[in-house]
Amino acid sequence: MERILFGDNQFFAVNHISDEKSRAQAMRFKDDEAIIRTLDYAIEAGIDTFMCTTHERIANICDIIRANPAKYKHFKIYPCMPYAHKYANAVTELGIVGTLKQYVPGNFFGSLFKGGVAFVSKDFISIMELLIDSEMKMFKGIDTPVIFLQNVVTDLLLGLGMKDILKGYYDHVKKKYKAEPGFITMNMPKLLDMLEDAGIENPVICASINKAGFRMSGGKEVNEEALRTRNFRPIAMQVLGGGAISPKEALEYVCSFPKIESILFGASSKGNIEDTVSKIKYFDGKNGR
Amino acid sequence: MVKVALIGAGKMGISHLAILGAHPDVEIAGVCDTSKMVTDVLTKYSGYNCFSDYLQMVDKVKPDAVFIAVPTKVHAKFIKDMLDRGIHVFSEKPFCLTPQEGIPLVELAKKRNLVNQVGYHNKFIGTFQEVKRIVDSGALGDIYHFIGESYGPVVIRKKQETWRSDPAEGGGCLMDYASHVVDLLNYLLAPIDEVFSSRLQPVFSNKVEDAVYAMLKVSNGINGMLSVDWSDETHRKMTTSVTFSGTRGKIISDANELKVYFRDDKCPAGYTKGWNVKYVTDLTEEVDFYLRGEEYSAQVDYFIKAVMGKVKNDINTFESALYTDKALQLIRSKAN
């Protein structure tokens, strides 16, 4: 994995501290061109990996990337699935069974219902595999070396103790996409326990890691202890702690953990992208990395 | 360990279940849902003891407490059945279809000394908790006006009808959505006790309103406005905000950001004259397990602690939720 990954929250009006900023972002990135322009700034700053949710607008971005193979020769995407709002809204409207009917591709579900719903639970992992395949369609022809499960799903499965489904996700991504399965979580130490229990070794885990301790569930110390002692490949996200810490202090903190392989950040302006990249390089240099 | 059972494994029920499942003081005693597919999956992959009949479940597994997350029309019956059996109850919002249904339940819970809470999670959000502290400190002077608002993309096209689109079952923007901001205003100021006028506006739905507008008053005399629209796709998700105008200051807060203006230096510690901005990140306590927002975990934890006798049962009680049901009924009665 590359040291610096570029995120997509800013493109989809995800802002953890201000609804006003969130609306301003929605206006700024109304057109796909604005997203591509910002991605190009990131590439110019030396970032070749875009970590993004499977939002419907990403399909357009993928079209542009496929249409310009020379320009995006080294460009990689780490998809994060699913785009949870799509399913959450559908569950409110259609219920859980109705949502599966709507989103599980093909006639698979229709035939299942003929065979009786009891069959569904036995083959729940096959249904999940079909959902993964449907989310992955938009990335066809694009290099996706790591594929992530979004935190709301990872953490839901974690809370429900469904380790076999996490393992099912892991196995399918490895086998079908020859990619490294990753897990986004807000509960890193607990998730590590469950993944180890499921026999998954040295997993890629993207977790909230920041000096403010923001969303480091279970406490900052427990998370730091895991970063020092446990066997996994961490990616730090929410490094600015939702805006609570200055960028310099924030990046100095994250760069101080040798175990952290990659740092994920998002920014809207060329200046902020360049600034963040140069700060990470500075602290990495200082730490002899 | 507190033995907890869940009745209703839909969207909110599953979310509570995952938070409960990760809670160190909770044992999941049973789960009840009418969907065989859902209970099959929870049996097979979570190992939960699942049922399709809620009375059969509680009589068999004898939980200390239940979470009720079923359509509003059956809240009153299910809650009563639990209280009669001496079981502590956390119910999803709104409390009941009408205040008439809720009044005896408030009495019964008190009489049997059972923990009783309703899932109005805004009270566990750091910014709104800070608004409450500032309002109670009197630092805004005499508050003379309020605005309560909620917007979000729930019904953004004509679509399939469910219980949420039937007013007789507790559907519609007033009960399902506006209830959150009504409850928050009740909590931050005082219970709404008069509605001067209201408008229940359909946008895409046939049988229910998709927006609610009202002019109202709370019991300590402050007048204000309510504006709620769940057919507003300019918001990525539900956004709730309050604005209070006082003789010494003004406060504007949503779940993320609190902006407060003080006219003079006589403001609470940590604030100064003029504008002050605080973010939820500075005002939020970490939780042990995070799923969809700290507030959901905090509210579950608060209920469990109340059952264990570690905290008082005084936030989101049935009684406070009954005030909300009363306000919702007033708003409906004045609709034109």
Image: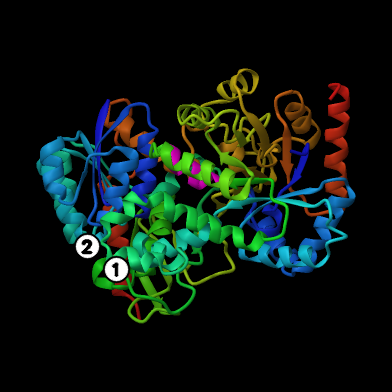
Residue placed most toward the observer, B179 or B27: B27
Choose top left, top right, bottom left or bottom right for residue B76: bottom left
Instruction: For mark 1, give the secondary structure.
Output: helix
Mark 2 belongs to chain: B
Residue A49 painted magenta: no
Residue at the disc numbered 1: B163
Q: What amino acid does circle 2 point to? A: Lys
Q: Residues within 10 Å of mark 1 (few under 14, many from 20)?
A: some
Image spot of residue B257 (x, y percent): 61, 48
**Residue B260 circle label:** none
How many residues crowd around disc 2 within 10 Å: few (fewer than 14), some, or many (20 or more)?
some
Q: Could you tell me which residue is drawn at 27 percent across and 25 percent down?
A: B1
Q: Earlier in the sequence, mark 2 or mark 1?
A: 2
Are dots 2 and 1 in contact, CB under 8 Å?
yes
The quadrant in which the C terminus of chain B is found is bottom left
Q: Circle 2 sits in a helix, a strand or a loop, which is it?
A: helix
Name the residue: 35% across, 62% down. Answer: A97
The answer to which image quadrant residue A278 occupies is: top right
* Callout 1: chain: B
Residue B128 visible in the displayed image: no
Both marks 2 and 1 on one chain: yes
- Quote the CA–CA distance across marks 2 and 1: 9 Å
Amino acid type shown at disc 1: Trp
Q: Which residues are magenta?
A: A150-158
Q: Position of residue A272 (x, y in %)?
A: 83, 47
- The x, y position of residue B146, in whole percent, is 50, 59
Q: Is residue B319 above or below residue B29?
A: below
Disc 2 target residue:
B73
